[in-house]
Image (cartoon, rainbow, N blue to C red):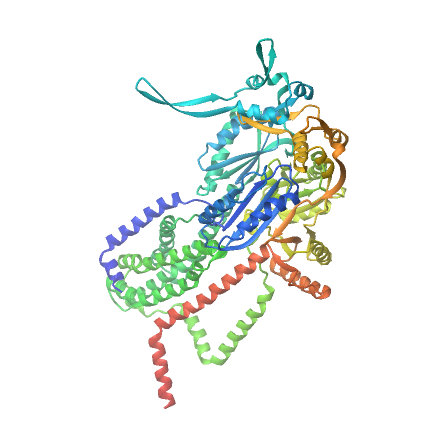
Amino acid sequence: MKIPKFAVKNPVTTIMMMCLVLILGFVSFTGLRLDLMPNINPPVVAVMTTYPGAGPEEVADVVTKPLEEVVGTSSGLETIQSRSSSNSSLIIAQYEWGTNISEIREDLSSMLGMVQLPDGVETPMLVKFDPTMMPIVQVAVSNGEDIAHLQELVDDTIVPQLQNISGVASVSVTGGFEEEIVVSLNEEALAEYNLTQSQVVQLIQGNNITFPGGVVEEENEKLNLRILASVESIEELENVPVSVTQNGEELDVVTLNEIADVSLAKKDITSMARTNGRDSLLISIQKEASANTVAVSSDVQDRLETIKQDHSEVRFSVASDQGEVIQESINNVLLALVFGAVFAIAVIYAFLRSVKSTVIVGLAIPISVIATFVLMYFTGMSLNIMSLGGLALGVGMLVDNAIVVIENIYRHLTLGKSRKKAAISGAQEVSGAVTASMLTTLSVFLPIVFIGGMVGELFEELALTVVFSLVASWIVALTVVPALASFMLKVVKGKERNGERKESRLYKKVITWALDNRIKTLLITAVAFISSLMLIPQVGTELMPSQDEGIFIIDVEMPEGTTLSSTLEVVEQIENELETVSDVDLVTASIGNGDAMMAAATGSSENTGTITVKLVPASDRSHSTERMMNDFEDQLEGIDRKATVRFSLSSSMEAMMGASNQIEVMLLGDDSEQLEEYSAELTERLSDESDFRSVTNSVQDGKPEYQYMVDKDLAMQHGLTAYQVATFINESLQGIVATTMFDTEVRVQMDGVSNSKEAIEELMMPTQSGQDVALSEIGEIVKGTGPVTVVRDNQQDSIVVTAVFEDVDMGSAASSIQATVDEMIDDLSIDTDEVEIKVAGGAEMMEEAFSSLTLAVVLAIVFVYMVMASNLVHSYNRLLLCLHCHWR
């Protein structure tokens, strides 16, 4: 190779190029984003649809199933899951990795638009799943007990200021209340003016418009015409005309306030937030996909400090901060990288026994690392624990090439050559070996780049950083090292040439014994290798190592139909118990969910609550988060027996990989009763095993409900259909949202309508004949049960059994569960063609990941062999020639 010769002959050029790389590296480093993990984009699309007032079965039959059929025809689809709850439908479609999700969304959007859905169903909304959808910062806000003033401050001041931060995508608020404009219609006044609720709604809608009128031409001007008839205040709404009456020869206009009371009122509270046992608001902040998580988090903290200075009565408590977790993780990896570099240089000095040689070789580490930053910047990578982990992994290998070169240069110096000749000859002589060494190492990591799926995206940056740094170190070894050696190393004197180091003498003894005892050496090697293989089953397996983030989650679920206040009582009991734990720093709780879409996605409603427990820093406590969580779970007694309480560790990777201490088993089939029977049996069997702390399943008791049974014959005698009756009941109890004014809904409802069973039966419904009929005359109200949620997987009914394990790794827990499943299938003679039972969730992802990585290992071995064969072909030829001669 002529590269070393050029570097030695042009040392200034070489050093300037090195300085240029260093400058570009520092500039690139400042532009790299900080994230916890590489940017992974799962090929997942969610279809979210709202059907107000509908039950789970109605949603499943008329919304979910028709949409499933359309989604199921899209190309590249792997799995499709659906969840039909009251008022909403959620379909999650997962595609093959590498699928163009943008094209899929466009195709689905056009196909879903052609599906005929019932009146009242809102337009399906397509959402691409993105890990950045999870909030990076959650802040609890409180100011004592004045929630009304606090909510006004949050909505008008705090949220707008946070949304203006660069990199913030959205800011949402949990807790508090919402307002609406309520138009309460007087039944007698409606009868007097011969109006109905629906007609009043249409009149309000017709008098609150802004409409284009066309173009007006006058005096050489051509201007647009707009019709302005919008309602801008409650006073204007009260004066909306709804009818006219004859007053002699004149007509008097009847306004809305003559037939109804118009007021600004609070909506029914369906969710609330608490901080350390007090009512509060919880602000969740999401970042843009391309934004720097740590930078956005830091800007949010600074903005909160600024707001606090202007509003001293407000208290901010950070419930979770992904930026803090990322910064801590990155700092740990950087510390490992620095220590690794220091130890590597110390070892180099111990063997080279030369400060100058150590400095020359040691420069390979920072130059290679900084050069890697340049390549990372231009390939769109970020600084995360995987990319920095690749640098930390390769930091010891970065000096390998330099050591080989510097040692050979030193050998040529001992032969009496000048520094320049020794640098050129020494570097050129080993350039082939150095290149082969570098290529064999690259052969180990490069196959990871070609692995698809989540594993490929997860480990791609680790592999690329190792590749980038090794290529950079190879260039440094063949350019910078010989250039510096040509004027930094001294010519070896005669007495120093014949000296033999102590390490060399020791190695000479070892290698001499190994060559004299070749059979023993091979036997020792074979025993060590076989022993290593035997230890493999003893090594646990996990998808990702668990990280102590100092946060655990307590999920509370009450029976269906439980009111928000009853769920709150249970949450308060747990909060009181947490006050006795000394290492708890902050407790935030959210009860219910006011957003129908999020309720469908998370399965939360008024009967559910989530408590987030943030502990003091690890340095200030004596136990791990998992140990404290388990201890508190044992301590938690006396809680309402109707409540189901689940504990889980918080993890920044949970959104993509699931909980680190849970395994899910999915049962699929067409017979829901049979699935419930098998899930109960599996739950009982797993509960008997010591490895599992708790085992639950997704089977839910029927939701208590009242059902109005329409007598269709009696209804038809009054000229009514079941649909007309259902619409009347729905509008009477829930009202009708007529329009929106200054971002506030206007709801039109009948005054004095009670939600009691008796009051509903006494409701008078107008008929086409002009006569009113009581609901009790055309039907009856009975109490019954309905499904809570209809869950389907690949268009089949499904039940999920969740097992929380402790003191074992995920691989062992998954193997234990699979053995139990196989045993149950044999004992109950389950037909696996009709019922599928499979381990899912994180365990399934781990199995797929290990399969992909096994392929990468096989490819790495093949590539290494190919590189070695291409470089050692001459040695093989000589060996074959010797064997041929010996045979003859």
The answer to whether residue 488 is left or right of residue 597 is: left
Q: Position of residue 682 (x, y in %)?
A: 70, 58
- Residue 437 at least partly seen: yes
Q: Position of residue 297 (x, y in %)?
A: 49, 38
The quarter of the picture where the C terminus appears is bottom left
Q: Residue at x 35, y 64 (%)?
A: 404
Observer-nearest residue: 879 or 162? Answer: 162
Q: Residue at x 31, y 68 (%)?
A: 497
Observer-nearest residue: 660 or 743? Answer: 743
Observer-nearest residue: 759 or 139? Answer: 759
- Residue 707 at least partly seen: no
The answer to whether residue 327 is left or right of residue 678 is: left
For the view shown, which residue lies furthest in the top direction? 248
Q: Position of residue 853 (x, y in %)?
A: 50, 62
Asked which quadrant contains residue 691, the reply is bottom right
Asked which quadrant contains residue 479, the reply is bottom left
Q: Position of residue 591 (x, y in %)?
A: 65, 37
Count of numbered circles on the image: 0
The answer to whether residue 514 is left or right of residue 736 is: left
The answer to whether residue 251 is left or right of residue 805 is: left
Observer-nearest residue: 71 or 81? Answer: 71
